[in-house]
Amino acid sequence: MAKSFTGVVTSNKNDKTITVTVTTHKTHPLYKKKYISSKKLMAHDEKNEAKMGDKVVIAETRPISANKKFVLTKVLEHAAITHQEGEA
């Protein structure tokens, strides 16, 4: 069974590629303090449908490139504010 993660899109600048930040809550084994761990994963987005700030689900798949080992499954919710780069 393939692993699936829920995260937030932090970058969609590359064509057909998104960078997703997945945060998990962990507990320290000795001190029992809860802390947050985050990891950036690159995922394949065939239709370029995910935008920055969207909450998405990604699933594990065969290696697509050197860094991409996940594929976009679905967009759970779109970002409230869309990011637009200013003109220079």
Image (spheres, helix red, strand yellow):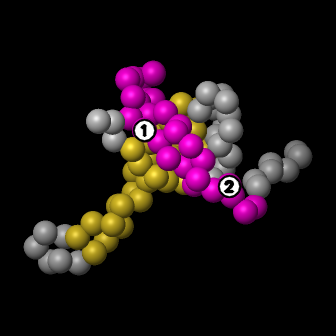
Q: Which residue corresponds to mark 2?
A: 78
Q: Position of residue 87 (x, y in %)?
A: 89, 46
**Relative depth, front residue between 60 and 8:** 60
Q: Is residue 9 left or right of residue 87?
A: left
Specify the segment rendered in magenta. Answer: 55-81
Mark 1 = which residue? Answer: 59
Point out the tag, 1 or 2, that comes first from the N-terminus.
1
Whole-percent x and y of residue 54? 63, 53
Count of numbered tags: 2
Q: Measure the C-alpha gap from mark 1 to mark 2.
A: 19 Å
x, y (%) of residue 57?
50, 47
Q: Secondary structure at mark 2?
A: loop
Q: Residues within 10 Å of mark 2 (few under 14, many from 20)?
A: some
In the rendered image, the quadrant that contains the N terminus is: top left
Would residue 30 be found to the left or right of residue 65 on screen? Answer: left
Which disc, if any, is residue 2? Answer: none
Asked whether 34 or 71 is in front, the reply is 71
Question: Can residue 53 be seen here?
Answer: no
| x 23%, y 70%: residue | 27
